Image (cartoon, helix red, strand yellow):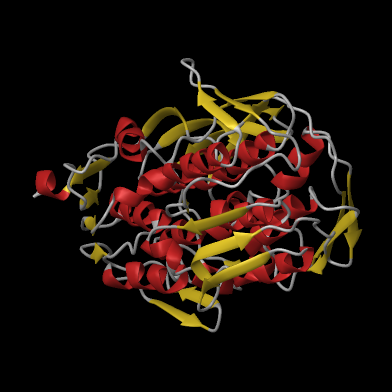
């Protein structure tokens, strides 16, 4: 968004139902990884459907600064000419990762096993987020990290001259930490082993195979053991990035909540480790049909037909959290408008997102009249409130909180205002226009007044 655009936006019930066919931006997790792995491969990789949000553009700029050639062609495809494993060089300037925790944490893995020096920083939100969960295990490969108290950015990284393979059991399920360790293992001698206590999104494993790495994944207890052979010769391999299920979540929930709505969302990633929200909504009584199932870039893809539904409250098990960790704010909106109470369990990971997303979601609902409590790491939402809306949500530089609040306004009795919409572009460029094309009533506050 331009600097001249008002930051505050307001949404309210549309005059009619939501309808139409749309596509959502490319999967953010896959887009980050596509740029990084392509930058470490030999040859040119063509990436179509790349998410052109601010977070991913920061990754593109970082890989360019480290020696890869990264360009956008006139047809919208991105082309990356990689350096090969071990071929990166020290950047001439500080790497600014903006608001992207994924980019920063994954890039720590890339830097840790290359004999280079780099400094990373980010915006005010990212500088508050902890990085120690990544830098502590990565130090075992021989990298040296210097960070602010608590392992926070800015962060200076001196990569290992002769990186050692890693063997690490994740204390909590985290696809970011797992991926950082695997990225470091690419330039280490020997086999890197990562054990995860429960399965997390496996885009890194899928992409490693796509580029030709030698990788095995076997069941291990309730989780998996991943073994990666170091110093492979990754070869360029074209990638089609499917639509992001985390972005699809917002029009899906909006269509479910606005009476009479029916929309189609084409080409959504249906990786089973990413579809916890879809499973949960179906259990709540949502009318969602998946059609035209196919594969793109090693990921299952399909089209979603979403019809307005009467939702009922639900008890969501903690084990489902890794498959829907980014979708809890929008799920909380659905639960607030559902019939009966809901309990969302095991949300501790939300405390270290772009904001303390657990506390921020609680505040979003309460300021708009919902009855909600937090017990430990669980959120309990009463559901079925007589009157919702009318509040102003402080988004705390959190794009998903901002979009969730705007969806709440589409279904609430009174309009909902957000204080700052600028950060929506980090993951969902064009969100406002896309929702308006379906019939949503969203306007800059100055226009809505």
State the image quarter where residue 83 is shown: top right
Residue at image coords 24%, 49%? 11
Q: Which residue occupies the foreground of this view, 352 or 222?
A: 352
Q: What x and y, as percent, mark residue 389? A: 25, 62
Residue at image coords 11%, 43%? 447
**Horizontal side, residue 125 vs residue 46: left or right:** left
Q: Which residue occupies the foreground of this view, 401 or 39?
A: 39
Report the number of numbered marks: 0
Q: What x and y, as percent, mark residue 33? A: 64, 42
State the image quarter where residue 346 is shown: bottom right
- Using the image, determine if residue 80 lies above or below residue 98: above
Residue at image coords 18%, 42%? 5
Say if residue 281 shows up in the picture.
no
- Using the image, determine if residue 117 lies above or below residue 232: below
Considering every residue shown, the one lying at the far left of the view is: 449
Say if residue 138 shows up in the picture.
yes
Considering every residue shown, the one lying at the far top of the view is: 75
Q: What x and y, as percent, mark residue 156? A: 55, 63
Q: Which residue occupies the foreground of this view, 302 or 238?
A: 238
- Using the image, determine if residue 319 lies above or below residue 44: below
Q: What x and y, as percent, mark residue 159? A: 68, 57
Q: Which residue occupies the foreground of this view, 82 or 162?
A: 162
Residue at image coords 67%, 50%? 110
**Horizontal side, residue 424 vs residue 302: left or right:** left
- Using the image, determine if residue 124 lies above or below residue 406: below
State the image quarter where residue 138 is shown: bottom right
């Amino acid at each position: 968004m331009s600097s001249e655009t008002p930051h505050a936006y307001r949404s309210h019930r549309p005059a009619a139902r939501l309808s139409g066919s749309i596509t959502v931006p490319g999967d953010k997790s896959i887009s980050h990884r596509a740029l990084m792995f392509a930058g470490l491969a030999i040859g040119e990789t063509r990436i179509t459907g790349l998410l052109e949000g601010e977070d991913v553009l920061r990754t593109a700029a970082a890989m360019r600064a480290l020696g890869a050639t990264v360009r956008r062609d006139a047809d919208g495809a991105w082309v990356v000419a990689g350096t090969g494993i071990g071929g990166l060089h020290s950047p001439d300037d500080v790497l600014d990762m903006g608001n992207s925790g994924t980019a920063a944490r994954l890039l720590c893995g890339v830097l840790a096993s290359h004999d280079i020096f780099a400094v990373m920083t980010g915006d005010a939100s990212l500088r508050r987020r902890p990085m120690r969960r990544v830098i502590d295990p990565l130090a075992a490969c021989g990298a040296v990290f210097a960070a602010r108290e608590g392992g926070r950015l800015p962060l200076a990284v001196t990569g290992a001259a002769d990186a050692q393979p890693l063997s690490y059991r994740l204390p909590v399920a985290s696809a970011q930490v797992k991926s950082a360790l695997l990225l470091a293992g690419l330039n280490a001698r020997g086999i890197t082993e990562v054990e995860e206590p429960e399965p997390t999104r496996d885009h890194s494993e899928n992409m490693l195979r796509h580029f030709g790495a030698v990788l095995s994944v076997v069941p291990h207890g309730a989780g998996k053991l991943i073994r990666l052979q170091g110093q492979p010769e990754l070869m360029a391999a074209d990638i089609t990035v499917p639509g992001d299920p985390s972005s699809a979540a917002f029009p899906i929930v909006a269509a479910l909540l606005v009476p009479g709505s029916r929309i189609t969302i084409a080409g959504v990633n249906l990786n089973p480790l990413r579809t916890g929200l879809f499973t949960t909504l179906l259990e709540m009584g949502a009318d969602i049909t998946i059609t035209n199932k196919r594969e793109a870039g090693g990921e299952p893809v399909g089209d979603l037909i979403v019809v307005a539904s009467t939702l009922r409250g639900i008890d969501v098990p903690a084990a489902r959290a890794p498959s829907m960790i980014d979708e809890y704010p929008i799920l909380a909106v659905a639960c607030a408008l559902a019939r009966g109470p809901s309990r969302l369990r095991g949300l501790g990971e939300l405390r270290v997102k772009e904001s303390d997303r657990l506390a921020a979601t609680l505040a979003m609902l309460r300021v708009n009249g919902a009855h909600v409590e937090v017990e430990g790491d669980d959120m309990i939402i009463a559901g079925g409130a007589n009157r919702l809306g009318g509040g102003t949500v402080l988004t705390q530089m959190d794009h998903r909180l901002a979009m969730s609040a705007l969806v709440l306004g589409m279904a609430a009795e009174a309009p909902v205002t957000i204080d700052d919409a600028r950060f929506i572009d980090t993951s969902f460029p064009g969100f406002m226009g896309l929702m308006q094309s379906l019939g949503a009533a969203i306007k800059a506050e100055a226009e809505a007044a």
